[in-house]
Amino acid sequence: MALSFSSSNVPISINNDSLGTKLTTYLDDNNLITKIDCTINGSLVDFLHLIVCKSKFIRTNHPDKFTSFNSSFDFYLVNSNNTKSVLAIGKISESEYKKIKFSLNGVVLDNIQDKLLENNVVCRISGNYKNYIRDDRIFYQTQDLNFLAVAQDKRTTEHVPNPNIGVIDS
């Protein structure tokens, strides 16, 4: 399987060796991450604090609002195309992974879910798009569309049409 997928710059791989530098995380008694040590420009910062601070500017039910992570998440400092970012990878099940890419100031850049399918196919879900990837190439793509029903006209007619219009007299 290919190590990376270039269109979103979020690696398909979950192999630690190909992801970058693993960041140190600290857990509380409920297996929630309380701190993420990350060195940015030579200074050690709590990256979780940056994420939570940036999340305050996002509306409550937005899918990119993250305020906590459980112990299934690992964080990596990634250097891709001379741009550094932090990649969070959480295991949902044996074949599903949540991947969130953050800028170094804690802003969500990508929020995707990868599902491993048969024959080395990965289904990458991002928003309402699904990309099916094999050998680092998209071979099938779908998009879920929601159509709104046309609103019914609520105007009333003031007169009844003449039923004799268009009738031929004999």
Image: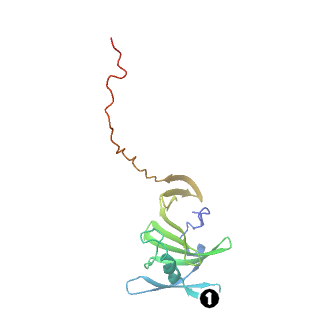
Q: Nearer the viewer, residue 53 or 137?
A: 53
**At 60% from the left edge and 73% from the top edge, which residue is drawn?**
18
**Residue linked to disc 1:** 43
133 vs 62: above or below: above
For the N terminus, which image quadrant? bottom right
Residue type, mark 1 in image: Ser
Q: Nearer the viewer, residue 70 or 160?
A: 160
**At 39% from the left edge and 48% from the top edge, which residue is drawn?**
149
Color scheme of the displayed model: rainbow
Q: Position of residue 92 (x, y in %)?
A: 43, 70
Identify the secondary structure beneath mark 1. strand
Q: Position of residue 15 (x, y in %)?
A: 55, 72
Q: Position of residue 118 (x, y in %)?
A: 47, 57
**At 32% from the left edge and 37% from the top edge, which residue is drawn?**
158
84 vs 170: above or below: below
Q: Position of residue 12 (x, y in %)?
A: 55, 66
